[in-house]
Amino acid sequence: MNNSSGEKQRWIYSTTVKDHFFHPRNAFQENENFIADGEGEVGSPACGDLMRILIQVDQKTDCIKACRWSTFGCASAIASTSMLSVMITENEGMKIDDALKLRPQHILERLGGLPDKKIHCSVLGDEALREAINDYFKKSGQENRIPNAPEKVIVCACKQITNVDIEEAVLEGATTLELVQKKTGAGTVCGSCVPELKTQIEQTRKKYFSNNG
Amino acid sequence: MDKNIYLDHAATTPLSPEVFDVMKPWMTTQCWNPGGIYTGGFLAKEAVENARKTVAEILGCLPKEIIFTSGGSEANNLAIRGVMNSKPKETGHLIISSIEHHSVLHTAEDLVRDGHETSIVNVEKDGQVLLENLKALIQENTKLVSIMMANNEIGVIQPIKEISNLLQNYGKNIVFHSDAVQCGTHLDCDVKKLGVDLLSLSGHKFYGPRGMGALFVKSGTPLRSQITGGSQENSHRAGTENVAGIVGFAKALQLAKEIRNSETIRLSQLRDHGIKRIQAEIENVRINGSAKHRLPNNINVSFWGVEGESILLMLNEKGIYASTGSACTSTNLNPSHVVLAIGQGHDWAHGSIRLSLGKSTTKDSLDYVIDELKKVVAHLRSISPVPLTPPN
């Protein structure tokens, strides 16, 4: 325990995460006058993560020209929001339509990965961004561009468990059938949905974890 | 500061050089089997029994009432499983507190699967168990009560003597176990004064070796062995004795007793100084757990609007080693069950950190930590969207 201060401290995440945690980009400064065209927030202090994203949009090019954010959460939450802000503003700004397609795995790739159980709780920035874009659509009279929420379908009728519940369970670390059953109760009564459960788990794993071990 | 500052003594402490010195021969030149019937074997056996005598004297019990184990978790498992399963096929009722260490909590949960019943007595806002709440849970078939002497996260000390009086006055043969793993350095663990039937200790919490613990078992307490395969430890725990560990454990406990009074005074003053500075210099903080009934080395504090893991990782960059009850370092994504149990909301629990002081802690080092903590909390709050003032 008595290392000299010259020795570098070890770190639990990738060096990119470290860089963004200690040197956050585009973080909102209290005294700056940033007029947002759209604003989105996701999470809550009780959940352990809260993110707010503010965007300015260039109406002519339909690109995000500036972004500010603030985040309450662990190091990976702070770093992932910072990275997201870079991704949507770099190279003259991202097209709104492309920004709507951003998902956690895109941020993860740029961050150099995160431990599985961290992904769901700390990579919420894309959701906050979609909210901010929808807010911009509302404020700029483009309500027709607001996408519909993903459809919820019941997979396990006995326990009333939906596809969204299963996706969340997998993202929270229940990566096998047994763990999903334990966590949600799905497929533990009549068992007829077990094949469908397996497919859903596999799909979620592919969607989020394929580049992350 | 040219050294890292270690403030995680509640997790583990460095082995004292004096302890290492007495252990060394038993791992190298005198590596004999205490069960052997050759001179070295007798000498090893003698070393083990002398160590047992030392521990027994400090705990105020008979040497044969001490069982050496592989650590605090094993001692807790042996106490709880050993008593609850003492009679084959007989199930019973167990009472534990809501803030027990996981080695008690999960063991109790596991016993429920075998048909035993478990009741959990909640603690008050200051972290203490109320006697009347405990009393209300006692049933006809209550076999064991397990309440920790001091909590590992918030350092709150329980009224063990009052609890044992209550149980004795009850007139039933309820066995009373206390997990005293956090207490070796700081509290008098005299089992007669405490009135306990079982008491767990862990060596590496008081500058002794890791992988060494002890369980006091009052003579006559029904206890089923959990590790079978040899007659060591009075047939309570099989396995070739860890002579070096046992000798080191006893030496460390002895040294802890010698410095107990002076360290308690010194650390209590440091702790109070630290708490006072945090409260005076950082807004919207809560100290978790009783100020009065508290281990001298424990500071546990929640900061509104910031997350514990972020605080720790920023402190780490400054060479400060501390720990958190935040969800982000746990495996189940829930924040500390202890901070929640004393009535703090999830929002406060996520922002909790623990600074546990020890022999190496000085006023200068603690002041440096608090100076850095102030900067870290201010920075994290500046990028946090959570309103600066918590709701009432």
Image (cartoon, coloured by chain):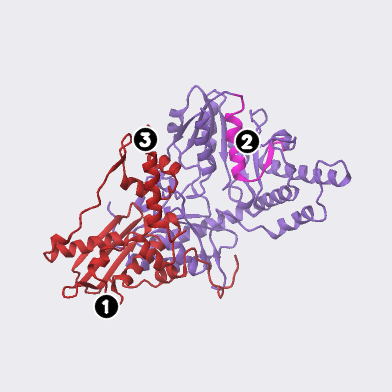
Chain colours: A red, B purple
Residue B150 is inside the magenta segment:
no
Q: What are the residue bounds of the magenta stretch?
A: B61-88
State if disc 3 and disc 2 touch (CB < 8 Å).
no
In the rendered image, the vertical position of residue B193 relative to residue B353, given as above or below: above
Type of amino acid at the residue the image marks with label 2: Lys
In the image: residue B192, left or right of residue B344: right
In the rendered image, the vertical position of residue B314 relative to residue B219, given as above or below: below
Q: Which residue is mark 2?
A: B192
Q: Are discs 2 and 3 located on one and the same chain?
A: no
In the rendered image, the vertical position of residue A71 relative to residue B43, given as above or below: below
In the image: residue B8, left or right of residue A86: right
- Pick out the residue farthest to the right: B39
Q: CA distance from mark 2 to mark 1?
A: 76 Å
- Pick out the residue farthest to the bottom: A92
Q: B72 and A170: which one is in front?
A: A170
- Residue B94 position within the rendered picture, expressed as x and y whole percent measured from the top left: 51, 30
Marker disc for residue A92: 1
Disc 1: CA contacts within 10 A as few (<14), some (14-19) or many (>=20): few
Give SS at disc 3: loop
Quarter location, residue B69: top right
Marker disc for residue B299: none
In the rendered image, the vertical position of residue A191 relative to residue A200, given as above or below: above
Q: Residue at x 75, y 35 (%)?
A: B231
Query: Is residue B162 among what the camera can see?
Result: no
Q: Which residue is mark 3?
A: A192
Q: A17 and B56: which one is in front?
A: A17
Residue B74 is inside the magenta segment:
yes
Chain of the residue that carries numbered disc 2 in the rendered image: B
Type of amino acid at the residue the image marks with label 3: Ser
